[in-house]
Image (cartoon, rainbow, N blue to C red):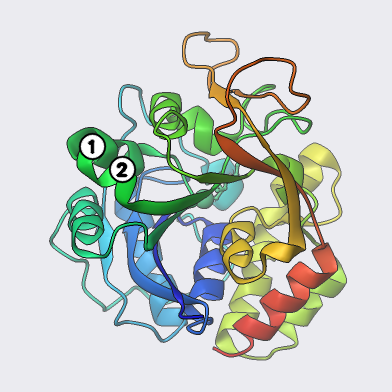
């Protein structure tokens, strides 16, 4: 089977970085047409810089990186330096990028790519707030039906929220963008906190990254060492949850994951529950299914894949 053509939309973020490294180390599975940065974990000028830092860490400076939206569709930007540090990639000390940022706006790159490539052959891997994706759909509705699939990290049901009691960060930052995306009709696979909180970088798993002895392996160990503080303190968890790599791992080994096709709606009106993913896991409404909501994974298989692939870089 030929590799899937993908665009990675991202707000690096240490876990975004690991997801990108997994994609860039798997050319037999994924052809990364471009990486589009969005404001999220940290402001846009840092997420676009961090995306280039990660490409250089992987030795893949031929992958074009684009800057996208610097704020949500209709709200103030909320960032997460308390989790990711002020640079967004705290942990390892990585050099500033020398590869160029593309001049073209990320939204125009996605539109142009979807119009150029054969219909339903490009998958959007979304690792941050959905602002860029929703802007694409609003600016060029003709490309919506040309998207093969959206695989995104976001939302929560049984796990409830990580930025408020009811909302996961990516959806919380731009709930209107999430609503546009979930109502678009595109085939969506959701990696919520329900599954990503089962992908914990325990000490042995962190050691396996470090023991690779490669720049990428060591950097991944240092990144997860840094950003596990937030989740250990909040949840008492046994390591950092690798949220975003669940997205790119799904494209390589979907059999590692399990979930249900259900209806997911986004709360956009209430201040109290803004950004909540109202997931009809038990089918108690007659609202049509619009997403595959992943609830579980084979964590050992997931980490074995990550170590093997990142060990290639
Ligand atoms: O809630 C976790 C998500 O928010 C991850 O994508 C992380 O990188 C942050 O963007
Ligand atoms: Ca992210």
Give SS at disc 1: helix
Could you tell whether 44 is left or right of 100 in the image?
Answer: right
Cα distance, mark 1 to mark 2? 6 Å
In the rendered image, residue 275, in percent from the top left (x then y), is placed at 54, 23
Which residue lies at the image location 68% right of the left edge and 15% below the top edge?
285
Q: Which residue is mark 1?
A: 141
Q: Which residue is mark 2?
A: 144
Q: Residues within 10 Å of mark 2 (few under 14, many from 20)?
A: many
In the rendered image, residue 1, in percent from the top left (x then y), is placed at 51, 80
- Say if mark 1 contacts mark 2, CB within 8 Å: yes
In the rendered image, residue 209, in percent from the top left (x then y), is placed at 72, 79
Which residue lies at the image location 69% right of the left edge and 24% below the top edge?
280
Toward which corner of the image does residue 249 lie, by quadrant?
bottom right
Is 12 placed above or below 70 here?
A: below
Give SS at disc 2: helix
Could you tell whether 257 is left or right of 249 in the image?
Answer: right
Toward which corner of the image does residue 123 lie, by quadrant?
bottom left
Is 251 placed above or below 268 here?
A: below
In the rendered image, residue 7, in percent from the top left (x then y), is placed at 37, 62
Is 41 placed above or below 217 here?
A: above
Residue 209 versus residue 283: which sits nearer the camera? 283
Which residue lies at the image location 64% right of the left edge and 16% below the top edge?
286
Could you tell whether 228 is left or right of 19 in the image?
Answer: right
Can residue 93 be seen in the rendering of this structure?
no
Screen quadrant of the C terminus = bottom right
């Amino acid at each position: 089977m030929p590799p899937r053509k993908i665009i990675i939309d991202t707000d690096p973020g240490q876990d975004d970085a690991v997801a990108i490294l997994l994609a860039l180390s798997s050319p037999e599975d994924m052809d990364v047409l471009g990486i589009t940065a969005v404001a999220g974990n940290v402001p846009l000028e840092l997420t676009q810089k961090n995306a280039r830092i990660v490409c250089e860490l992987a030795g893949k400076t031929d992958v074009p990186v684009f800057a996208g939206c610097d704020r949500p569709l209709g709200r103030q930007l909320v960032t997460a330096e308390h989790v990711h540090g002020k640079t967004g990639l705290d942990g390892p000390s990585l050099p500033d990028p020398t590869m160029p940022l593309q001049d073209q706006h990320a939204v125009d790159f996605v539109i142009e790519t979807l119009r150029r490539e054969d219909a339903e052959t490009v998958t959007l891997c979304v690792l941050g707030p959905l602002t860029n994706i929703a802007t694409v759909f609003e600016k060029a509705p003709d490309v919506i039906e040309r998207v093969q699939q959206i695989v995104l990290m976001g939302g929560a049901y049984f796990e409830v929220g990580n930025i408020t009691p009811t909302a996961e960060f990516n959806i919380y930052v731009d709930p209107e963008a999430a609503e546009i995306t979930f109502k678009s009709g595109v085939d969506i696979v959701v990696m919520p906190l329900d599954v990503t909180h089962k992908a914990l970088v325990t000490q042995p798993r962190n050691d396996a990254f470090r023991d690779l002895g490669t720049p990428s392996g060591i950097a991944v160990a240092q990144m997860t060492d840094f950003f596990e503080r937030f989740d250990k303190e909040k949840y008492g968890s046994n390591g950092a949850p690798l949220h975003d790599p669940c997205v790119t791992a799904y494209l390589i080994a979907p059999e590692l994951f399990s979930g249900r096709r259900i209806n997911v709606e986004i709360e956009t009106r209430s201040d109290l529950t803004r950004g909540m993913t109202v997931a009809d896991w038990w089918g108690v409404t007659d609202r049509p299914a619009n997403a595959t909501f992943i609830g579980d994974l084979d964590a050992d298989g997931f980490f074995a894949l990550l170590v093997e692939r990142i060990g290639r870089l």
